[in-house]
Image (spheres, rainbow, N blue to C red):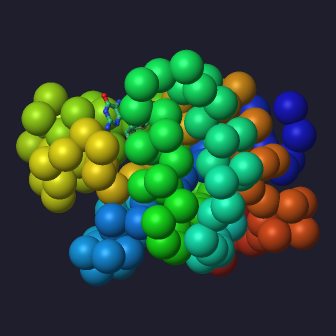
Amino acid sequence: GDAWTGMPGSITERSFFAIKPDGLQRGLVGEVMSRFERKGWKLVGLKMLTPGRQLVERHYEEHADKDFFEKLLDYMCSGPVVAMVWEGHNVIAGGRKLLGATNPLEAGAGTIRGDLCTNAGRNLVHASDGPESARREIELWFSREETVQWGRATDP
Ligand code: GDP
Ligand code: MG
């Protein structure tokens, strides 16, 4: 591992998240980011863009054969998203937990999807599902210069 993506389980573990177009449409960017901040994780990458089809195809390449793939591409390219890298202890598995299940009906109360949305096809936020996808997705969405290493005054 390296300092950029971090080692799984270490304090510098990093994961990729994206607030999907419905999150911006519904004005939930601050609400979502606030939950990550309150959890204690550190924001080390942040940008807003309307992703092109090619980027989303690569991002979701594991789903290329699914019947919902074209709909998923249309949805993800329908407007701006907020792409983020968060760093911290167990941020990969913990980030998935904070999101809740893919289908909001199965996402528990208290999770982002459980609390804030109803539709599996409009489920607000993406999170990497493991160390391999975290590394792959960070490298896909961010250049090295676009992630920021910084420390809190309280770290030492
Ligand atoms: P995630 O990792 O929890 O986001 O879920 P997956 O990797 O399984 O699926 C990726 C994304 O595809 C989900 O977040 C949904 O936006 C979408 N998706 C997954 N399953 C379905 C489905 O059955 N129907 C539709 N319309 N979208 C789906
Ligand atoms: Mg997934």
**104 relative position to 88: left or right:** left
- The quarter of the picture where residue 7 lies is top right
Report the residue that reaches farthest toward the top: 65
**In the shown orientation, is residue 41 left or right of residue 67?**
right
Left-right relation of 72 to 10: left
Q: Is residue 87 visible?
A: no
In the rendered image, residue 79, in percent from the top left (x then y), is placed at: 48, 72
Left/right of residue 89 with respect to residue 23 in the rendered view: right
* 146 vs 74, nearest the viewer: 74
Q: Quadrant of residue 48?
A: bottom right
Q: Quadrant of the C terminus?
A: bottom right
Across and down, in percent, residue 1 comes to: 86, 32
The vertical placement of 75 against 21, above or below, is: above
Q: Residue at x 53, y 61 (%)?
A: 77
Q: Residue at x 33, y 65 (%)?
A: 22
Residue 55 in sight here: yes
Coordinates of residue 60 in the picture (x, y in percent) = 59, 36
Q: Nearer the viewer, residue 79 or 24?
A: 79
Q: Is residue 156 above or below residue 63?
A: below
Q: Position of residue 28 (x, y in %)?
A: 29, 73
Q: Residue at x 47, y 66 (%)?
A: 78
Front one among 146 and 123? 123
Tell me the residue at 13%/48% (across/down).
118
From this view, report whether residue 70 is shown above or below residue 123.
above
